């Protein structure tokens, strides 16, 4: 079973990326549970899960990620041994929790860009060395935490994807919808990897 931590801050809404994420889970017949990021959850409540996904969610321009609203206990969450994937806002939460420097563009217009895949990562299996995405985030990781390595970048964004050097922590700093078919493939790669390792697939 997978745990989806829902970072959408607007009540009773579901963005396109969340819909695509749930569609991928259903397509691969993965069991899952959804918890809001401010849900109360004890550490032993994580035991049933073979993988965790921190979903994307809307942030206003310049708004900071509030790690304090993680009543799930972020330290316990990131301390688990199961694979974790952060998408968009979820990726930023992981990066900032480990000390990444996040900056904001003052003048920003979304546009298509080519992302270069830099090394072998489970997220990019079955994909080309470059993928096209719609870069629609005004914030970006300007400086990686020392414990992470860069796995994808573009001319517009120095860090589109990163992963922990020793833990099963993966961060995709763009939405599933922004990458189209490639976004869906990345999510399925993670689900298959975590599910196979945990005996769920």
Image: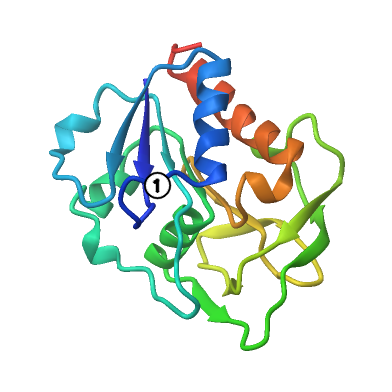
**Residue found 41% across the figure and 64% down from its top:** 98
* Front-most of residues 11 and 196: 11
- Residue 15 in sight: yes
Q: Position of residue 130 (x, y in %)?
A: 86, 49
- State how many labels appear: 1
Residue at screen point 41% across, 60% down: 93
Please identify the residue farthest to the front as the structure is shown. Answer: 12
The residue lying at 52 percent from left, 67 percent from top is 146
> In x, y percent, where is residue 78?
34, 48
- In the image, is 146 to the left or to the right of 136? left
Residue 195 drawn at (x, y percent): 49, 19
Colour mode of the rendering:
rainbow
- Residue holding disc 1: 13
Residue 191 falls in image quadrant = top right
Q: Is residue 144 left or right of residue 45?
A: right
Badge 1 crowding class, 10 Å Cα cut-off, few under 14, some 14 to 19, many 20 or more, is few
- Secondary structure, mark 1, is loop
Residue 9 horizontal side relative to residue 147, left or right: left
The location of residue 200, given as percent across then percent down, is 44, 13
Apparent side of residue 63 relative to residue 122 in the rendered image (left or right): left
Residue 117 in sight in this render: no
| Quarter of the N terminus within the rendering | top left
Q: Quadrant of residue 189?
A: top right
Q: Residue at x 19, y 45 (%)?
A: 39
């Amino acid at each position: 079973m997978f745990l989806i931590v829902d970072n959408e801050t607007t009540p009773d809404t579901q963005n396109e990326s969340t819909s695509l994420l749930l569609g991928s889970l259903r397509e691969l017949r993965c069991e899952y549970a959804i918890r809001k990021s401010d849900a109360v959850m004890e550490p032993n409540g994580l035991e049933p899960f073979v993988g965790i996904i921190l979903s994307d969610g809307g942030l206003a321009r310049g708004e900071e990620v509030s790690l304090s609203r993680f009543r799930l206990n972020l330290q316990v969450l990131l301390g688990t041994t199961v694979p974790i994937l952060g998408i968009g806002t979820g990726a930023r939460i992981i990066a900032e929790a480990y000390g990444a420097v996040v900056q904001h563009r003052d003048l920003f217009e979304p546009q298509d860009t080519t992302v270069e895949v830099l090394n072998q990562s489970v997220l990019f299996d079955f994909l080309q060395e470059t993928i096209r995405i719609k870069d629609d985030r005004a914030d970006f990781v300007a400086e990686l935490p020392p414990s992470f390595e860069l796995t994808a970048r573009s001319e517009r964004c120095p860090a589109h994807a990163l992963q922990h050097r020793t833990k099963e922590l993966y961060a995709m700093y763009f939405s599933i919808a922004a990458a189209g078919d490639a976004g869906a493939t990345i999510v399925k790669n993670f689900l298959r990897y975590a599910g196979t390792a945990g005996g769920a697939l």
